[in-house]
Image: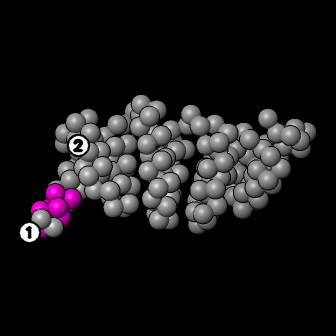
Amino acid sequence: MCPLARTCRPLRSLGSRVRAKGDKASATAELIRYEKIGGRNPESLKLLAKNLEEAGRPLEAADALNRLNFVYPMDAAAHSSLGGLWLVQGNTKGAIREYAAVIAKDPLDPAQAHFDLARAYHANKQDEQAKDELLAALEAAPGFRPAQKLLLELSTTADRLKK
């Protein structure tokens, strides 16, 4: 997978071994080197994103997850994590794309997946689509309080705007 296979494999395993010893900064540095030389192992890229997020580097974590999605687009958890990072960073269109990808993968928790997409739509000022996603979330789990609360908030806001 890596164009420099003899170089990538040792870096990938070194990053995992260094993290196991508790030196996250060194592990992150090795995994960044691995990524920069073309490393494409999904587990290593996930570990890199996790380390970067834990280190308070969300922009770089989002970049690592975005790269992972090009390498292995079938990972719903990576799409969900990237959607969350982008939503916090204000990239609402990217968050919508990632959360829609989670729903397309038939998630284990469809209520949460639809709720996350609704939050992204709401942040992007697409409240009608947000309501549709909230209804889908409540269809999957009628007692899902966060979805109930956001739907009530959106409905109340829409009623105020009509008056």
Magenta span covers which residues?
153-160
Q: Residue at x 50, y 65 (%)?
A: 89
Q: Label 2 belongs to which residue? A: 135
Q: Quarter holding the N terminus?
A: top right
User: Tag 1: residue type?
Assistant: Lys
Residue 74 is at least partly visible in this image = yes
* Image location of residue 45, percent across then percent down: 68, 46
Above-or-below relation of 123 to 145: below
In the rendering, which numbered label is found on residue 108?
A: none
Q: Residue at x 16, y 57 (%)?
A: 155
* Image location of residue 93, percent across then percent down: 47, 56
Q: Locate residue 135: give its quadrant.
A: top left
Q: Quarter holding the C terminus?
A: bottom left
Task: Give SS at disc 1.
Answer: loop
In the rendering, which numbered label is found on residue 163?
A: 1
Mark 2 or mark 1, whichever is nearer to me: 1
User: Tag 2: residue type?
Assistant: Leu
Question: Can you name the residue that lies furthest to the left here?
Answer: 163
Above-or-below relation of 4 to 87: above
